[in-house]
Image (cartoon, rainbow, N blue to C red):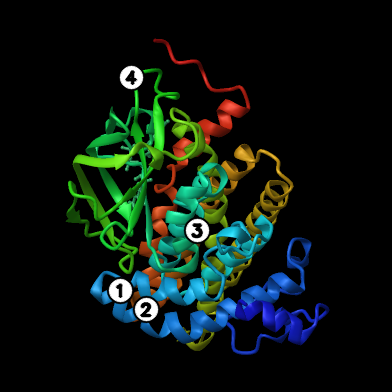
């Protein structure tokens, strides 16, 4: 049984462990607002994950950042053994089958990892490459790909973006042509997180020539299949612990039974899968923003200029207070999206709003906080510079800010119809 389940039993349902964190970074929020979606079990889950982060992840982050890669199989096995890779996935395949609020408690807690790359890689496994498989995949595919991903025995990646198609998902060129009972894939994927280490890819490909929203399928593609090549490890501005690959697909043969759900529904499944990716992205920035504010408070108390702590200047403590206020707005909206999604509602608009504001706020927060560290903020010796680099991605990856705005406008009926 997962460690945290045992803990819940031992400590009893009424204990809110959040109030007992003693060695944590600041928990500005814990007693004030989080009980809206988080009960004692959520806090137990977070506490159990925090112990893993403090013991098995954070002590190694500097080394992984320097190596430009973290050992995904090793880390995922630890997380899988403790139930963290299948929180809302079916028990039948090894998951805990808890509602989505628990998955988001995990996403939020992952924000206590001392970099953005490792949480992103975990999010790809849990909330980006596997939701469609869990929801629509056949029993065969779930046993073959989902169960080992939940156990931490397999690493997954998501192959949607291509060299010529990022924001415009419908324009992908990778093709899976039918040959008897098999599919032959040709094309390539770009920006594939976990791509150099993954055992399988949830790959979006065109399976017919029909309309672009109805000619695509999601396919489980084992990465060791002949014809799959990691063409390039992409060097990036940030997210250094996470490997990002360009993948070539040349006459890659997979059985047709590897199509997730119904053939031709891949675009729709991917759009549904994006809802979880976007809520995950919003939840994953909450702790980094909170931690950056509290680290900046600590630093600016210690650092004296013109005879007083930097924090004493009104512009500094007012700015940090305003960032804390905006953080709480984002947290509340994210929790609302999570609560509605857990009830089965379509939260496309709210999830897109949360992702948009998360990207904007985390950029503003890391930039403003870094400013108050002066020259130190510009060095690799402090964590604020890492988060400044890593968090820049939130406004680009998983749908850029402008894509979020387009979705929101579409749902507000304000997006002009494109002339064809
Ligand atoms: C580190 C990293 C990891 C990633 N991991 C993955 C992964 O695992 N799997 C995967 O499939 N993809 C992944 N991606 C790809 C990511 O989702 C895309 O980069 C993103 O969707 C943007 O696509 P693009 O880079 O092709 O930019 P483009 O589509 O070329 O867009 C360029 C810019 O145009 C602007 N723009 C877009 N739409 C509009 C609009 N409607 N109006 C006005 N302006 C607009 C935006 O500012 C956008 O940034 C990753 C990317 C990075 C950098």
> How far apart are labels 3 and 4 at the CA level?
31 Å
- Ligand 1 rendered quadrant: top left
Q: Is residue 99 visible?
A: yes
Task: Please name the residue shown 36% across and 82% down the image.
Answer: 60
Instruction: Please identify the quadrant where the N terminus is shown.
Output: bottom right
Give residue 172's quadrant in the image: top left
| Horizontal and vertical percent position of residue 320 | 58, 68
Q: Secondary structure at mark 2?
A: helix
**Side of 294 where 62 appears, left or right:** left
User: Helix or strand or loop: what does disc 1 sit on?
Assistant: helix
Local packing at callout 3 (Cα closer than 10 Å; few below 14, some 14-19, many 20+) is many
Q: Are marks 2 and 1 in contact (CB under 8 Å)?
A: yes
Give residue 120's quadrant in the image.
bottom left
Marks 3 and 1: which is nearer the front?
Answer: 3
Q: Is residue 409 depicted above or below 283 in this figure?
A: above
Mark 4 — residue? Answer: 209
Furthest residue toward top = 420
Say few, some or many: other residues with alpha carbon within 10 Å of mark 2 (under 14 / 14 to 19 / 20 or more): many
Residue 122, given in percent of the width and then of the height, sits at 45, 64
Front-most of residues 298 and 283: 283
Per the image, the residue denoted by label 1 is 65
Report the disc number at residue 61: 2
Q: Secondary structure at mark 3?
A: helix
Earlier sequence position, callout 1 versus callout 4: 1
User: Which residue is at the far front?
Assistant: 180
290 is higher (above) or lower (below) than 132: below
Residue at 60%, 38% in the rendered image: 348
- Residue 56, position as x, y percentages in the image: 44, 83
Q: Are marks 3 and 1 in contact (CB under 8 Å)?
A: no
Q: Mark 2 vs mark 3: which is more N-terminal?
A: 2
């Amino acid at each position: 049984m997962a460690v945290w389940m045992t803990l819940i039993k031992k400590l009893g349902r009424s204990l809110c462990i959040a109030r007992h964190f003693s060695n944590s970074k600041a928990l500005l929020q814990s007693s004030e607002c989080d009980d809206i979606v988080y009960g004692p079990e959520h806090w137990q889950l977070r506490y159990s994950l925090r112990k893993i982060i403090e013991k098995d992840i954070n002590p190694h982050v500097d080394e992984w950042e320097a190596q430009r890669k973290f050992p995904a199989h090793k880390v995922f096995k630890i997380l899988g053994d403790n139930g963290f890779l299948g929180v809302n996935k079916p028990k039948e395949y090894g998951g805990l089958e808890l509602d989505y609020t628990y998955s988001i408690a995990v996403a939020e807690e992952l924000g206590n990892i001392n970099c953005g790359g490792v949480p992103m890689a975990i999010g790809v496994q849990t909330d980006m490459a596997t939701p469609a498989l869990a929801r629509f995949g056949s029993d065969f595919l779930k046993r073959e790909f989902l169960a080992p991903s939940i156990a931490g025995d397999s690493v997954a990646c998501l192959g949607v973006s291509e060299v010529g198609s990022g924001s415009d998902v419908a324009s992908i060129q990778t093709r899976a042509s039918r040959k008897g009972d098999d599919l032959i894939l040709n094309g390539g994927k770009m920006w594939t997180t976990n791509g150099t280490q993954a055992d399988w890819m949830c790959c979006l490909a065109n399976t017919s020539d029909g309309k672009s929203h109805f000619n695509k399928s999601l396919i489980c593609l084992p990465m060791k299949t002949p014809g799959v090549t990691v063409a390039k490890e992409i060097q990036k501005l940030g997210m250094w612990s996470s490997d990002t690959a360009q993948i070539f697909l040349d006459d890659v043969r997979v059985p047709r039974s590897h199509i997730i759900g119904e053939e031709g529904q891949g675009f729709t499944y991917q759009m549904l899968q994006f809802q979880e990716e976007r809520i995950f992205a919003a939840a994953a920035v909450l702790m980094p923003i909170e931690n950056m504010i509290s680290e900046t408070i600590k630093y600016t108390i210690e650092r004296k200029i013109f005879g007083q702590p930097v924090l004493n200047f009104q512009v500094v403590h007012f700015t940090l207070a305003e960032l804390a206020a905006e953080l709480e707005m984002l947290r509340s909206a994210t929790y609302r999206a999570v609560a509605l999604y857990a009830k089965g509602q379509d939260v496309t608009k709210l999830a897109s709003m949360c992702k948009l504001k998360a990207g904007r706020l985390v950029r503003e927060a890391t930039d403003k906080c870094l400013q108050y560290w002066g020259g130190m903020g510009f060095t690799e010796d402090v964590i604020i510079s890492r988060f400044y680099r890593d968090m820049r991605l939130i406004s680009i990856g998983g749908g850029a800010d402008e894509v979020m705005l387009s979705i929101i406008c579409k749902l507000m009926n304000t997006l002009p119809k494109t002339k064809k």
